[in-house]
């Protein structure tokens, strides 16, 4: 991933080089005119067409870069390590949603990691803790339902140990949740999200989501089975950056 200061330096060098080359060309105009036997009118028309071509090509080049250029996807994990340790499992989701202190702490941890970055689009899960974390970090996100967390169904609020006591060998990634989603279900909505992000034009995109869902998003970004999200441990209030290298999807940064 290329930082914004490096991009600015590259643009400065490109414009300076272009100016040098253009100046060198102008110094040779009389010789070119004589070699080609051009009249004043013909020379003027050639220079005018050259300028018009530059004006027309710039927006076309920008549109092509936006449409076909690489995408940098920043994933901010808005999860906070509280809910599942609460005494009443049935209340853990609601408690996480109203735990303002946890939201503020997550936002404070995320804000410095995102400082100085410019984004073409900012999206968030519809869950309140993700939206509030985005807002407290200084962003006004667009809500995208596909970023919601893994639907745990009948297992909402229960620990893995509790579930395995009733269902030995149960594994979230392999078995999914009755009344909720499987990894493949989450993968399907992440596929739709990825396709939309790659087609819509913005090149630097920030999403605020949740641990398990973002891990599935990472797996699908890399072309892996959704179950392989188990291999990407994403800490609360961490940032991951997904991008590409030489046309191949890649992880540029993880747990930053």
Image (spheres, rainbow, N blue to C red):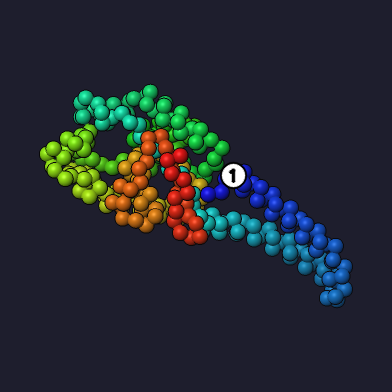
Count of marks overlaid on the render: 1
Residue nearest the viewer, comparing 41 with 165: 165
Image position of 181 (left or right of 233): left
Residue at image point 37% right, 26% down:
102
SS under mark 1: helix
Residue at image point 83% right, 76% down:
36
**Which x, y percent locates residue 179?**
18, 43
Image position of 255 (left or right of 62): left
**Which x, y percent locates residue 105?**
41, 27
In the rendered image, the vertical position of residue 151 relative to residue 194, given as above or below: above
Is any part of residue 109 visible from this angle? yes
**Which x, y percent locates residue 229?**
32, 48
Residue at the top extreme, as displayed: 101
Image position of 5 (left or right of 88): right
In the rendered image, the vertical position of residue 209 relative to residue 40, given as above or below: above
Is any part of residue 125 visible from this angle? no
Residue at image point 23% right, 40% down:
152
Image position of 2 (left or right of 53): left
Q: Dot 1 corresponds to which residue?
A: 4
**Which x, y percent locates residue 19?**
76, 55
Q: Mark 1, residues whose alpha carbon is within 10 Å: few (<14), some, or many (≥20)?
A: few
Residue at the left extreme, as displayed: 166
Residue at image point 69% right, 63% down:
53
* Residue 78 image-quadrant placement: top left
């Amino acid at each position: 991933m290329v930082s914004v200061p490096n991009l600015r330096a590259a643009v400065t060098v490109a414009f300076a080089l272009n100016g040098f080359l253009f100046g060198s060309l102008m110094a040779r105009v009389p010789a070119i005119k004589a070699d080609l036997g051009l009249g004043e009118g013909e020379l003027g028309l050639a220079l005018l067409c050259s300028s018009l071509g530059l004006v027309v090509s710039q927006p076309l080049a920008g549109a092509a870069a936006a449409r076909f250029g690489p995408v940098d996807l920043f994933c901010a994990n808005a999860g906070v390590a509280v809910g599942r340790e609460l005494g009443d499992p049935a209340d853990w989701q609601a408690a996480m949603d109203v735990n303002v202190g946890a939201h503020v702490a997550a936002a404070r941890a995320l804000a410095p990691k995102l400082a100085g970055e410019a984004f073409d689009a900012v999206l968030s899960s519809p869950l309140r803790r993700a939206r509030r974390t985005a807002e407290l970090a200084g962003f006004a996100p667009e809500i995208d339902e596909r970023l919601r967390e893994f639907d745990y169904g009948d297992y909402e609020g229960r620990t893995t140990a509790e579930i395995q006591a009733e269902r030995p060998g149960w594994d979230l990634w392999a078995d999914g949740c009755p009344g909720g989603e499987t990894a493949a279900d989450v993968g399907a909505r992440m596929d739709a999200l990825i396709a939309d992000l790659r087609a819509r034009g913005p090149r630097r995109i920030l999403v605020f989501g949740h641990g398990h869902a973002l891990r599935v998003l990472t797996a699908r970004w890399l072309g892996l089975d959704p179950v392989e999200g188990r291999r990407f441990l994403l800490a609360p209030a961490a940032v991951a950056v997904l991008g590409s290298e030489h046309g191949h999807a890649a992880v540029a940064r993880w747990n930053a």
